[in-house]
Image: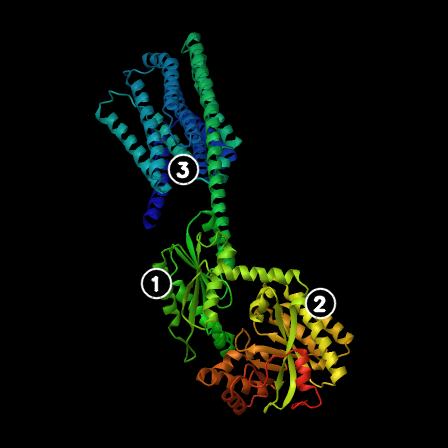
Amino acid sequence: MRMDKFVNKFSKLYKIILIATLVLSIARLFQAKVVFLLSGIGSLILFLIKYKSQNKCVRKNVKPFLISFVFFLTCLLMIIFIKDIEHLSFYKIFLSLLFTIFIICTHIGLYGFLRQLDIKIDILQLVLNLFSFYAVVFWSGGEALTHFFNTYVTVNNGYLYYLLFISIVSEIFTLSLTLCLETVKPPKGIVTLISTIFLTFAFCFFYLLNIFSGKLIYIDIASVIITIITLLNLDFSMLSPEDFKLEITIEESENKYADSKVYFDTLSLSAGFLFIILIPILLFAFKEISINRVIISIIISSLYYILSLFYLSFTVKKNLLQYHINLNAIKQAELEQKKNEILKSNEILINQYHTDYLTGTWNREKFYLDASKLIDSHTPFTLIYLDLDRFKVINDTYGHDTGDVILKETAQRLKRFSNDITSIYRVGGDEFTVLSRIVDREKLTQFSLELINIVQVPYLHNNTSYYIGLSIGISEFPKDSCDVDTLIKYADFAMYRIKKSYVQNKIEFFTQDYYLEIERKNRLIKKLENSDFNEILHLNYQPIFYPGGKKIKKVEALLRWHDEEFGYVSPAEFIPLAEQTNIIFPITQWVIDKSFSDLSRLKKEYHADFSIAINISPKTLTQNPLIYNLLLKSSYYGLDNSQIELELTENFSVYLIDYIKEKIHVLDQNNFTISIDDFGTGYSSLEYIKDLKIDTLKIAKELVDNIEEMKQDYSLIASIISLSKALNLEVIAEGVEHKGQLEILESLGCDLYQGYYYERPVSFDALVERYLQPDNLYNIG
């Protein structure tokens, strides 16, 4: 930066010194008014051309204009104060000024071509320009110069060669400066410094040559001085580094190829043509050349002008075409960039859509998409279905915050196995699937064992260790099926068989033998869809006792299926099928009607004073007709709603909790009693049970079964009973089958008991016979 400032200051100072020296030299050597008048007019012409350039080409540098104008004013002042014009040589002044005009016009024309050619020097046009210029000068001016030398100046003809030499040097300097600007792109101050040093060196060289040569070559000092000052003005104003930017924006390109620029290029050609034509005409006017030479000069100049205009038009069109090509390329690149940005944004959105919000693994939608792609490409793969053992117990006991932490940690552990051939997905609450292109069973077994081992590692949260297991079911494509849903069903079925066996951390492959069980399920579904429920379904009733087993508080209506084709079908088998196929809705309506009808008979005919509990699937609770039908049937059979208890199975999704809460609130307002069945095996926890209008909790049989052997189940039941009492909830223990279980539950303060220890589920008639006859052994109430 300091060097640039120094160069700029030095250049300005040098210009002032140079101009002052030139002016004083002219005044001392010639003291001629006409010299300064004509030189001033030449500078004024140059100033006007620059002013035109300012309007048409939007030039910004006004310093050269001021320099030219100051020089013009200086010339006028010199004319006023200089009186002696005796030593004036008109031909010498005229020839010097004429040569100066040649240089000006040549530079203007050359500069116009350089600009419109984008500084890419066109050799053909350059040769044409120089040839036309020098041909006209020496063709038309040769005779005049010879006559001038022979008549007015007693010197040798070296002056003619001097003019030729200084012209060539000027052109070489201009081209060198142009190429330098194009290649190096130096600061403007350095360009000015180089120009002034070069021209000063040329001036000193010719001046010294004149002294030491003994004036063998006549050097016209006025011509040299005027030429130098003109070139300085021209080069410093026209050849500016800002004009040679090769990298341009679209907006600059539009200005670069605008009509105003083409107008200036045409103007520069016209100026060159005009002055070249004027030379022979003026010489003819002074009777220095013949009319033939004037005509030939005009013809040559006209050809030069026509060819130059034609070439200018061709070049402009070529550049415009190139501009549009460049513009299209730029816009194409911009479109491609925007396209890539949109694709990237879409990819991010798609990944977010396909990512499980809790664990960060792929979700169910992504699983279906990837599995379908593998099937469509006929790529063999295995579907590994994972279910976390004992997760529900931990989730129920310690809340969903703890459950979420375990799910996240499990996902992170499983994701360690994710690679190019294996992907991990979360498809349910505590269920994950794996798509793997490992098809060798031995390798699959080893891979599955690794999954089990990594999940078995204790989970530490809030200074507490949690232990869960993993049950795995596997189906294979294309061996087992070519349908995604079927493969899921098969893998889930294989996993479910492990769950039913209560064996944890086991792997099960789907086999062809399972087809019989699946076929049975399909037949059961078809039977439910096409049968009269009164023919295949019936209700049994199991009493629920106070402690001691002498008093019945309520009876639970239990749905049973028995027919000739299938025999006895367990509710654990057909209820899930009914829920999967939506047959659960008409079945629930049938249970409501049948149980309400039986309760009405018990009250009217046998004066029973206990309530009845019926099981309601949370899936049916989401349907508005359920509540309407409950109210309708209760009113129809004349029942008190407070004696009707609705047992909700616990496996409803926590994501429906707000909706179910709303439905339970409506039931509570209509005096129905609400209980949660099989508590401790599903998704619910006391954390949000307290927010529901729940009256009763029924501890799941799976927990009661192990209360004597497993300390963890004992502690869990104790916690449930303790917290239930704190929430003023009634607690029922399901599946009480042994005296030891009963004693432990009584010691923990359980309210009611249900199980084989007291009574199995019995038919309506058996219930009446055992508990509602005058000589029965039980007290009801």
- SS of the residue at dot 2? helix
Q: Measuring from the top left, give residue 19's x and y in whole percent.
A: 37, 36
Query: As rendered, which of 58 and 533 lies closer to the eye?
Result: 533
Q: CA distance from mark 1 to mark 3?
A: 66 Å
Mark 3 falls on what kind of element? loop
Q: Is residue 359 visible?
A: no
Q: How is the image coloured?
A: rainbow
Marks 2 and 1, Cα distance to the nearest angstrom? Answer: 51 Å
Which label lies toward us, 2 or 3? 2
x 30%, y 34%: residue: 198
Horizontal and vertical percent position of residue 549: 60, 89
Q: Pick whichever, 728 or 526, lies toward us.
A: 526
Among numbered discs 2 and 1, the one appearing first in the sequence: 1
Q: Which residue is mark 3?
A: 246
Amino acid residing under circle 1: Gln
Q: Which residue is mark 2?
A: 625
In the visual, does 487 lie left or right of 583? left
Tag 2: amino acid: Pro
Q: Which mark is residue 446?
A: 1
Badge 3: few (under 14), some or many (20 or more) residues near its Cα, within 10 Å?
few
Secondary element under disc 1, as helix, strand or loop, is helix
Taking 193 as reference, is 450 above or below it?
A: below
Viewport quadrant of the C terminus = bottom right
Few, some or many C-alpha atoms within 10 Å of disc 2 (few <14, some 14-19, many ≥20)?
A: few
Q: Earlier in the sequence, mark 2 or mark 3?
A: 3
Pick the front one: 96 or 163: 163
